[in-house]
């Protein structure tokens, strides 16, 4: 049987249940950034300009720009709210004492 998370994150309808739940959620909320990035990649595949063959003209694809703006509006909507988390001393100590590697050491 599908759990709540599986139903919510179902790919049916391009994550329609998740998008609906997110739009109804009250901030503070952290959206799934992977879906927003996937949307942006999909949008980027559309042409920047649209040719009008009949008049031999080219027009800016404002629909593409509008879709990009909507994606960024979602991000901005959730960034403007403050998240008040209590500091966990054990986690904070672990993060402060963790080994920090530079790029060369990561390779």
Image (cartoon, helix red, strand yellow):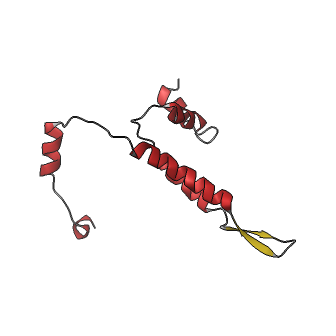
* Nearer the observer, 85 or 91: 85
Relative vertical location of residue 3 with respect to residue 57 in this rendering, above or below: above
Q: Is residue 76 rendered to the left or right of residue 101? A: right
Residue located at (52% from left, 26% from top)? 2
Could you say where residue 18 lies in the image, as x and y percent from the top left? 54, 35
Could you say where residue 31 lies in the image, as x and y percent from the top left? 45, 42
Q: Residue furthest bottom?
A: 56
Q: Is residue 96 rendered to the left or right of residue 62? A: left
Residue located at (61% from left, 59% from top)? 65
Relative vertical location of residue 82 with respect to residue 50 in this rendering, above or below: above
Residue located at (46% from left, 48% from top)? 75
Q: Is residue 89 rendered to the left or right of residue 17? A: left
Quarter where residue 81 is shown: top left
Quarter where residue 52 is shown: bottom right
Residue located at (18% from left, 59% from top)? 100
Could you say where residue 73 lies in the image, as x and y percent from the top left? 51, 49
């Amino acid at each position: 049987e599908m759990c709540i998370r599986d139903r919510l994150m179902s790919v049916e309808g391009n994550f329609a249940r998740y998008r609906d739940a997110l739009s109804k959620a009250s901030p503070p909320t952290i959206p799934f950034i992977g879906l927003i990035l996937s949307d942006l990649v999909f949008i980027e595949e559309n042409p920047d300009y649209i040719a009008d063959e009949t008049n031999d003209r080219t027009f800016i694809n404002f629909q593409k720009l509008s879709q990009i703006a909507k994606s960024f509006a979602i991000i901005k909507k959730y960034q403007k709210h403050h998240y008040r988390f209590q500091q966990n001393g054990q986690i904070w100590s672990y993060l402060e004492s963790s080994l920090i590697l530079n790029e060369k050491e990561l390779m």
